[in-house]
Amino acid sequence: MRSLLLSVVLLAACDTSTTPGPAASNEVNAVAAGNAAEAPLNPPAPGTPGGLPDDRTPVSEAPFSETSAQGAANVLQSYFALIEQRRFGEAWRLWSDEGRASGASEAAFGARFAGYREYHANIGAPGEIEGAAGSLYVEVPVQVYGRRADGTPFSAAGPATLRRVNDVPGSTQAQRRWHIASIAIAEPR
């Protein structure tokens, strides 16, 4: 009896009624063919126009603090990951002044990315932290690349500047975190 029950269970597991039919197969093949027709995304290499700086100085892989230059670069990495995931509101809030430093409202900020199907970024090694007027600044090179809504590839590069308030009396914990002060990337070509 036990072997008969096992045989019935195994036969049920082999049931092909849930296998996609020809229409579903054609749809999967069409998507695969559409993706295969597009050239792979190859952003410019470091040291070439539109690429990140060709700085071969190794970046430490040791744990870093939230307040270090690498901590600032990590905020930028998170920012572009959120954009890639189309989580624009969360990305907008990583800008200074509760998003206002982006130069747009939260809704207008998200609308900036409507013309892109894919949006990726490479983050370079952060520069040295500099201080001015109670704040700390660090510049981080960024390269963005991806596809526009029509499928054409794009790429551009430029610096991003991150800012945090120094550990001064009266500053809030939120002010003492790195935020994006500016990103100077020309309109992707």
Image (spheres, rainbow, N blue to C red):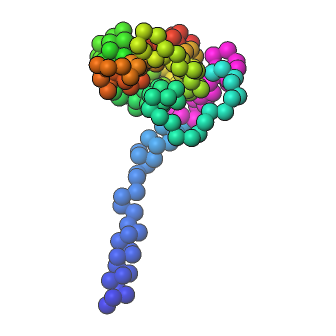
Q: Residue furthest front?
A: 169
Start and end of the magenta stretch?
A: 34-51
Q: Is residue 126 visible?
A: yes
Q: Provide residue 106's location: percent of width, then percent of height.
A: 30, 17
Q: Nearer the viewer, residue 157 or 5?
A: 157
Q: Provide residue 189's location: percent of width, then percent of height.
A: 56, 12
Q: Quadrant of the N terminus?
A: bottom left
18 vs 35: above or below:
below
Q: Is residue 77 visible?
A: no
Residue at coordinates 52% horizontally, 16% vertically from top-left?
Answer: 130
Residue at coordinates 40% horizontally, 57% vertically from top-left?
Answer: 19
Residue 156 on the magenta span: no
Q: Residue furthest bottom?
A: 1
Residue at coordinates 36% horizontally, 61% vertically from top-left?
Answer: 17
Q: Provide residue 188's location: percent of width, then percent of height.
A: 53, 14
Q: Provide residue 90's location: percent of width, then percent of height.
A: 33, 27
74 vs 16: above or below:
above
The part of the image, by quadrant, that contains residue 182 is: top left
Residue 48 on the magenta span: yes
Residue at coordinates 42% horizontally, 23% vertically from top-left?
Answer: 178
Q: Main secondary structure of the magenta part?
A: loop
62 vs 9: above or below:
above
Q: Nearer the viewer, residue 173 or 11?
A: 173
The part of the image, by quadrant, that contains residue 4 is: bottom left
Q: Nearer the viewer, residue 37 or 95?
A: 95
For residue 178, side relative to residue 64 (left or right): left
